[in-house]
C-alpha cells in the first residue's frame, strides 16, 4: 500500500514539474488563451458546422420493418397458442412496469411527472404493439 501511495505521489509531482517547466519554455509569441468574456472581439458564439445526422447502418430500413411486422402479424394469427402466450407476456411486462413506476414514485415523489409522461408514451405505443395479436 505504501508503494502505491509513493508511486502515485511521485507521478503527480512529476506531472506538476513537467507542467511548470513546459510553461517556462513556451514561445512567448505563441497565442495565449483569452477567455471569451475578456476577448476584444464580440462574444457571439460561432455557428456549428452543419452536418447531416448520422444514420446507424445496422438498423433495419423502414421497408424491412414493415416486412418484419407483416410476417410477425401473420405468425401470431396462424399460431393462436403463441399469440396467447405473447399477449400474456406483454400483460405481465406492463404490470411489472406499473409496479416499478409506483415504487419509484413512492421512493421519490418528484419523479411522478416524468413517470406520467412515460405512461402516456407507453399507452400510445401499446396500441400499435398489441394490435397484431388481437
Image (tube, rainbow, N blue to C red):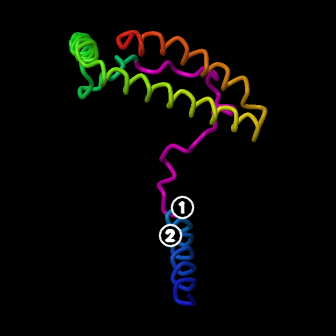
The quarter of the image holding the N terminus is bottom right
Label for residue 14?
none
Q: Earlier in the sequence, mark 2 or mark 1?
A: 2
- Determine which residue is flagged by label 1: 23
Give whichever of 119, 71 is nearer the camera.
Answer: 71
Q: Which residue is mark 2?
A: 18
Give the residue at x 42% y 22%: 87
Q: Residue at x 37, y 27 (%)?
A: 85
Foreground residue among 54 and 78 = 78
Residue at the (70%, 33%) spot, across then down = 102
Indicate the position of residue 62 as horizontal and vertical percent values.
27, 12
Q: Is residue 37 above or below residue 127?
A: below
**Principal SS element in the magenta part?**
loop
**Would you say 76 lies left or right of 121 here?**
left
Q: Position of residue 14 (x, y in %)?
A: 51, 75
Quarter of the image for residue 24 reads bottom right
Q: Nearer the viewer, residue 23 or 88?
A: 88
Residue range in magenta is 24-49
Amino acid at each position: 500500500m505504501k508503494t502505491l501511495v509513493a508511486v502515485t505521489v511521485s507521478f503527480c509531482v512529476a506531472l506538476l514539474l513537467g507542467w511548470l517547466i513546459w510553461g517556462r519554455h513556451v514561445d512567448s509569441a505563441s497565442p495565449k488563451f483569452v477567455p471569451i468574456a475578456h476577448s476584444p472581439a464580440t462574444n457571439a458564439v460561432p455557428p456549428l458546422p452543419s452536418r447531416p445526422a448520422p444514420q446507424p447502418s445496422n438498423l433495419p430500413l423502414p421497408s424491412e420493418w414493415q416486412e418484419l411486422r407483416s410476417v410477425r402479424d401473420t405468425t401470431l394469427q396462424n399460431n393462436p397458442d403463441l399469440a396467447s402466450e405473447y399477449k400474456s407476456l406483454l400483460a405481465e411486462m406492463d404490470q411489472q412496469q406499473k409496479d416499478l413506476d409506483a415504487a419509484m414514485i413512492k421512493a421519490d415523489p418528484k419523479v411522478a411527472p416524468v413517470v406520467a409522461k412515460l405512461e402516456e408514451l407507453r399507452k400510445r405505443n401499446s396500441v400499435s404493439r398489441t394490435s397484431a395479436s388481437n
